[in-house]
Image (spheres, helix red, strand yellow):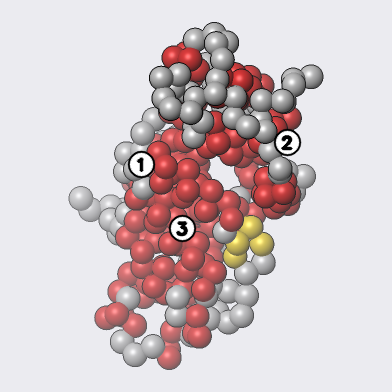
Amino acid sequence: MKWNTLSVAKLYTQKSRKSRNKIFFGDIPTFKVSAYSLSKSKKVLLYDFYVLSYISTLNLNPQSKGYLGEYWGSVDDVVEHIKDAKDTLIPYMKEDLLSAVFDSICCESRHLIHHFHHFYIEDLSKKYPLVEKLREFLENNRFGRSSAPIKIRLWLLKNNVDGEKFVTEMTKIFSLYKFWDSDYGGRKWSKICRGWLRLFQEKTDTGLFIAIDHIFDLEHNSGCVLDKIERFKICGNCDWVEESLTRKHNAQSINELLPYCSSDMKKLALKAIKMSRSYGLHDYQPN
C-alpha cells in the first residue's frame, strides 16, 4: 500500500492510543474487567504489580505437601481472583510500558543528527539502511522532544516499518557507543532497547513479570527511562519510580508494600496470605 503524509496522519491521529499501538506492535492480549480494578495512579499500579507477583507464587492448594493454610472462605475463589487480577493488570502494563518506552526511544533517536558521528562508519547506508533513512528524515524535519514520538511513528508507518524492526535496528546503533557523544545514546539506550524487545516478545506469565520488572529498573544517561513521558510523571518528575523500587528492595515483608496498593489488591493479598499461612506473613493485620 502506498502511503502519503496526509492519509498516514489522518489514520494515526483518528485512532485511540491502543489502536495506534496495534499498528506498530501487533496484537497484545486485551485486559478485562474483573474483581480487580485498575487504579488511575501509575504509582499504585507499580505496587499492585509487585504484590501480585508475590501472591501469584503462594501455595494455595490444600492438597499439596507442606500446605500451611486454614479454611477462610473458598480457596478456588481466591485463586480465580488472582488469575483475574493477572489477566487485567499484566496485559495493561505490558501495552502501557511498550508504548512509553517506544516513545522514549523515538525521542532519543532525534540525536542521530547531532550527537551520533555517522561519518566515521563506512557504508552506513549498507550496514544500517533504516537508520540512515531515519537520519536523513531528521535532517530535513526538525522538531522537539514532545512531538518526536508522533513524528517518528508517522515516518515509520509511511515506510512500512513496524515497532520491533525499528527497536532492533536502534539497539545496534546505540551499541556503537564510541560514535555517540557523552550523555546521548550509547550503552544505556542499547540496554533500554533490549528491555523493550524482551517485553515485546515475552508470552509467559513468569517471563512477563520479569520483563516488566526489568523495564522499571532501566535508566538512560540522566534518569529513569520513563521520565520523558508526561503520563508517568508525578509532580513533574519520575522520582516516585526510584523511591518505590527502593522501598520494595528494603522491605522485610510483603506487608510493608500493602499500604501503597489499591484497595482491591490489598484485600486480595490479605486473603491469599491468610490462606497460605506462609511463615512471617500471616501476622499482618489490616487497619
**Residue type of the residue flagged with mark 2:** Glu
Q: Which of the two residues, 240 or 103, is positioned nearer the viewer here?
A: 240
Q: Which of the two residues, 19 or 272, is positioned nearer the viewer here?
A: 272
Q: Name the spot of residue 238 as percent of width and height, x first.
A: 69, 50
Structural crowding at the residue carrying mark 2, measured as other residues with C-alpha within 10 Å and reported as few (<14), some (14–19) or many (≥20): few
Q: Earlier in the sequence, mark 1 or mark 2?
A: 1
**Closer to us: mark 1 or mark 2?**
2
Residue at 54 percent across and 57 percent down: it is: 104
- The residue that disc 1 covers is 204
Dot 1 falls on a residue whose secondary structure is: loop
Dot 2 falls on a residue whose secondary structure is: helix
**Closer to us: mark 3 or mark 2?**
2
* Tag 1 near tag 2, CB within 8 Å: no
Does any portion of residue 277 appear in the rendered image?
Answer: yes
Q: Name the spot of residue 236 as percent of width and height, x first.
A: 74, 48
**Residue type of the residue flagged with mark 1:** Thr
